[in-house]
C-alpha cells in the first residue's frame, strides 16, 4: 500500500509528546488524521460516551471523550476511512493480559478491530517512576520507528489477516537493542490492596519485579522482551470468547 490513510489517537491526550512524535514520524508514510482526547484519559479502558464536544487543534481534532470515542468519531465522522488505526505512543508500557482491558491505548486498537480496521497500540516502557515524567522527544524514536515498520511492512504482507491488532511495547530508550520479538501477553498478576483509615491503596507489584536482575518468565512473553531490552509485538484478536465446551452445554442443560 503506497500511501495508507492513518487515524492516530492515544489516551494521554492530544498535547502529549508521544502522539506528536507519531504524527511527525508517520506523516511521510501516509495521510495522518489525529483525533485524540482533549485531556488525559489513561486507564479508562473501553469506556464510551453518547456525546462529546470536538475542537480543532494544530494536530487535528481534540475530542472531549475517551480513546474509544476518538476511534468511533474518527472512522465515522471526522476523518477519511482509515487503512490503519494507531494509538500512542503511550507514556508507560502496556504489558500483560490484565492491562488489555484497562488501557485506553489498547482499547482504541480493539475498537478499530471491531470496525474491521487493522490497528497498532504503541507504548514506551519507562522504569521506576520515570513514567510520571515527560520523556524527551527523542526518547520516542524507537517506538515510532517500530510502528512505521509495522505499517509499511504489515499492511501488504497479510499480517492483519493473522491478527486483528498489535500491542507494541518499546523498551526504555537507554536499554533498547533495536531488535523486535513476537510475544504473547504475560499472565503474571500481582495486585495488592491495603486499607488505612479512609483510604485503600492499590499497588501493582510487577513493575518492581521487572527491575530485578533475576526476573524471568519465559522469553516469549511481552514483559520478558522488555526486560531484555527488545521491542515486544503481541498479535492479538479482538473478540473475547472461549472455545466450545461440552461441559458448559451440560451445565446449561441441567438448569
Image: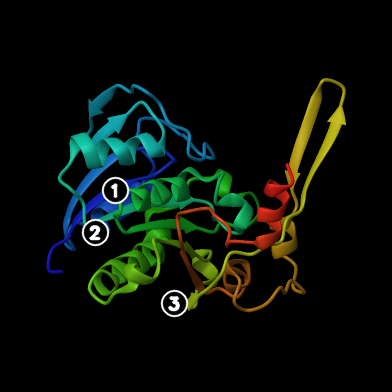
**What label sits on residue 8 in the rendered view?**
1
The answer to whether 244 is drawn above or below residue 80 in the figure is below
The answer to whether residue 161 is left or right of residue 31 is: right
Percent x, y for residue 213?
74, 73
Identify which residue is drawn at 18% across, 41% down. Answer: 79
Q: How many marks?
A: 3
Mark 1 vs 2: CB contact within 8 A = yes
Q: On the image, numbered disc 2 is attached to which residue?
A: 26
Report the residue that reaches farthest toward the left: 2
Q: Please state, as top left, top right, bottom left or bottom right, where the C terminus lies in the image.
A: top right
Quadrant position of the N terminus in the picture: bottom left
Q: Picture quarter containing residue 244?
A: bottom right
Horizontal and vertical percent position of residue 13: 39, 37
Decide: few, some or many residues near mark 3? Use Cα within 10 Å; few <14, some 14-19, many ≥20: some
Q: Using a 10 Å C-alpha cutoff, classify the residue at mark 1 as few (fewer than 14 neighbours), some (14 to 19) or many (20 or more).
A: many
Nearer-N-terminus badge (3/2): 2
The residue wearing badge 3 is 178
The one nearer the camera, 129 or 4, is 4
Q: In the rendered structure, which disc, 1 or 3, sits on the residue that comes first in sequence?
A: 1
- Left or right: residue 101 versus residue 23 is right
Tell me the CA gap for discs 1 and 3: 24 Å
Amino acid at each position: 500500500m503506497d500511501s495508507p490513510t492513518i487515524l492516530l489517537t492515544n489516551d494521554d491526550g492530544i498535547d502529549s509528546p508521544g502522539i506528536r512524535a507519531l504524527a511527525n514520524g508517520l506523516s511521510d508514510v501516509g495521510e495522518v488524521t489525529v483525533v485524540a482526547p482533549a485531556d488525559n484519559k489513561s486507564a479508562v479502558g473501553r469506556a464510551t460516551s453518547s456525546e462529546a464536544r470536538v475542537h480543532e487543534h494544530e494536530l487535528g481534532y481534540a475530542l472531549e471523550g475517551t480513546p474509544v470515542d476518538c476511534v468511533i468519531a474518527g472512522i465515522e465522522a471526522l476523518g477519511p476511512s482509515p487503512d490503519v488505526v494507531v494509538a500512542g505512543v503511550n507514556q508507560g508500557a502496556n504489558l500483560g493480559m490484565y492491562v488489555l482491558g484497562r488501557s485506553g491505548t489498547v482499547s482504541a486498537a480493539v475498537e478499530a478491530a471491531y470496525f474491521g480496521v487493522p490497528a497498532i497500540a504503541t507504548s514506551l516502557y519507562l522504569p521506576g517512576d520515570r513514567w510520571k515524567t515527560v520523556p524527551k522527544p527523542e526518547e520516542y524514536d524507537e517506538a515510532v520507528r517500530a510502528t512505521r515498520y509495522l505499517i509499511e511492512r504489515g499492511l501488504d504482507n497479510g499480517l492483519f489477516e493473522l491478527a486483528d491488532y498489535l500491542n507494541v511495547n518499546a523498551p526504555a530508550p537507554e536499554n533498547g537493542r533495536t531488535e523486535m520479538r513476537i510475544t504473547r501477553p504475560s499472565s503474571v498478576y500481582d495486585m495488592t490492596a491495603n486499607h488505612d483509615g479512609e483510604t485503600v491503596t492499590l499497588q501493582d507489584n510487577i513493575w518492581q519485579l521487572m527491575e530485578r536482575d533475576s526476573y524471568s518468565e519465559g522469553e516469549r512473553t511481552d514483559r520478558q522482551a522488555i526486560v531484555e531490552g527488545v521491542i515486544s509485538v503481541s498479535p492479538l484478536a479482538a473478540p473475547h470468547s472461549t472455545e466450545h465446551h461440552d461441559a458448559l452445554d451440560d451445565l446449561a442443560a441441567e438448569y
